[in-house]
Amino acid sequence: MGKGIIQQFIEWIIHNGGLYMLLLVIFAETGLFVGFFLPGDSLLFAAGIYVKDLAKEFFDVHYSLIILLVIIASILGNIAGFWFGNKTGPLLYERKDSLLFKKKYLVRAHDFYEHYGKGTIFLAKFLPILRTFAPIVAGIVKMDKKSFHFYNIVGSVVWVSSMMIGGHFLQSIVWRKFGYSLKDHIEAITIIIVLVTTLPVLFKLFFPGKKKTSGPPTT
């Protein structure tokens, strides 16, 4: 049975450029407009499965250093996105309304980040597409830099570590107990990860629930 397109793509990234390609993809997916389509979660999990191979290719270091480098790439990707948004923000605020652009949506985004920006930067790490645009929007609406950097670092550490360490140890457990490698099942793992990370967002989007209505005024 042949490998699926997703598995071939992820394995191509791992084997063609190895760590350097991995760092580039994570950097792009966490802050560059062009990176929103890249498979961040599944790639990190697959990188965790291959992390010892990546460590051997990179001066035979301990695999924890590989994880640290990926965390740094994620942090820098968000910083790049925030910087880009911060620079383009003033231009957007001065732009006149058009069919595709309404300034009121920018104001709403600013108000949203004032209240929920910290949680958004952290949680967006675990949500495809959102993790690409969240830091850019944060820069556009001038989110507090200290808060942004703190939650960017915390989110990057938790996201990268959970995915890569999870892939590494699950691979070890499955190989030890059942004698087969997860490297042959990356396609299925990718689909599961995508479903787990996107279904809650889609459910919330299409089934937002009923808004609470206030009762009649009391006298």
Image (tube, helix red, strand yellow):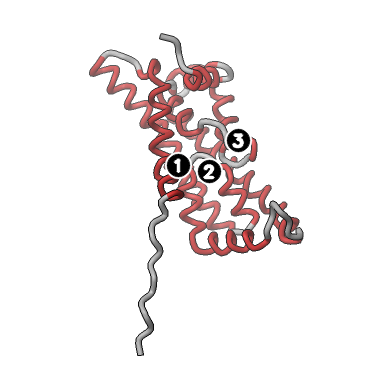
**Contact flag, marks 1 and 3 (Cβ < 8 Å):** no
Q: Earlier in the sequence, mark 1 or mark 2?
A: 1
Q: Secondary structure at mark 3?
A: helix
**In the rendering, at what x and y percent does residue 52 appear?**
42, 20
Q: Residues within 10 Å of mark 2 (few under 14, many from 20)?
A: many
Q: Residue furthest left?
A: 177
Residue at the far front in the pictured view: 216
Query: Quick one: label 1 or label 3, which is nearer the N terminus?
Result: 3
Residue at image coords 28%, 23%: 173
Helix, strand, or loop for circle 2?
helix
Q: Is residue 101 visible?
A: yes
Task: Answer with mark 2 or mark 3, whichever residue precedes in sequence.
Answer: 3
Percent from the top left, x then y, of residue 215?
36, 77
Left or right position of 85 against 95: left
- According to the image, label 3 marks what residue? 35
Location of residue 13 with respect to 114 vertically, above or below: above
Label 1–label 2 contact, CB within 8 A: yes
| Relative to 124, 89 lies left or right | right
Q: Is residue 217 above or below residue 176?
A: below
- Could you tell me residue 200's position as x and y percent? 40, 45
The residue to which callout 2 is attached is 131
Check disc 1 and give the amino acid type.
Phe
User: Which image quadrant is residue 188 in?
Assistant: top left
Q: Which mark is residue 126?
A: 1
Give the label on residue 95, or none.
Answer: none
Where's the C terminus, which quadrant? bottom left
Q: Residue at x 63, y 45 (%)?
A: 81
Of the pair 71 and 128, the residue shown nearer to us? 128
Q: Mark 2 is on which residue type?
A: Arg
Could you say where residue 128 lies in the image, as x and y percent from the top left?
50, 39
Find the distance from the CA under tag 1 to the CA under tag 3.
15 Å
